[in-house]
Amino acid sequence: MLGGIGLAWLAFVEIGLAYPVSGWLYPVVIIVLAVGLIRRVPVQAQRSRLAVLSIAIIALAALYDVEWTTRKPFLRDLAKVRPGMTEPEVRQIMRRYQEGTGWPESPMCTEAQRSTGQTVDGPESRSSAQPLDGSGELTLPNSLVFRHSNAAKFNSDWGIISFSGGRVVGVSFSSD
């Protein structure tokens, strides 16, 4: 019973919420299913239980392996970015994704603020987002932002890679 609930929960999170589950949870669910299904009786007496366990293992493998949305491969690639990498190394890993926030800069932003990299609310603003590059798109200082989709459900999923001294110092994911 508990293993079935685990399988249903993994399926809901992976497919329904479009949020990949950590790989270590899959073997845990398989073990719980096995403990719940397998009995100390001859194999012939529990063929149906073994068939259910086999089907569950195949379903779990599919849940883990199938890229249900563009978020899953994006997060896998983002996880490959490590502290100490250079910008070209990061761009190589993230090359198949869109670069930039996709958000327009504030219409309140003046040319002077644009040229100095100051936020609309001033340097003490709670937001660190600044339009620095003159592209009309909001940028984050000392950071690269990558997106995996323009679809409404995911258009603000940001992979944020922070740099200091030309090297990665932080990697984070901000979901839509």
Image: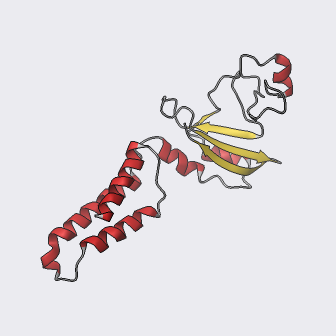
Out of 79 and 41, give the one closest to the viewer: 41
* Residue at the (48%, 29%) spot, across then down: 151
Colour option used = secondary structure
Residue 116 is situated, as x and y percent measured from the top left of the image, at 86, 26
* Residue at the (80%, 26%) spot, across then down: 121
* Residue at the (73%, 45%) spot, across then down: 162
* Residue at the (84%, 31%) spot, across then down: 123
Q: Is residue 68 left or right of residue 39?
A: right
Residue 96 is situated, as x and y percent measured from the top left of the image, at 56, 39
Q: Quadrant of residue 136?
A: top right
Residue 170 against residue 156 in the figure, above or below:
below
Q: Quadrant of the N terminus?
A: bottom left
Q: Is residue 77 left or right of residue 109?
A: left
Q: How many marks?
A: 0
Q: Tell which residue pokes out farthest to the left in this image.
A: 45
Residue 49 is situated, as x and y percent measured from the top left of the image, at 19, 69
Residue 48 is situated, as x and y percent measured from the top left of the image, at 15, 68
Residue 73 against residue 53 in the figure, above or below:
above
Q: Quadrant of residue 128?
A: top right
Q: Quadrant of residue 173?
A: top right
Q: Is residue 37 left or right of residue 29?
A: left
Q: Quadrant of the C terminus?
A: top right
Residue 115 against residue 41 in the figure, above or below:
above
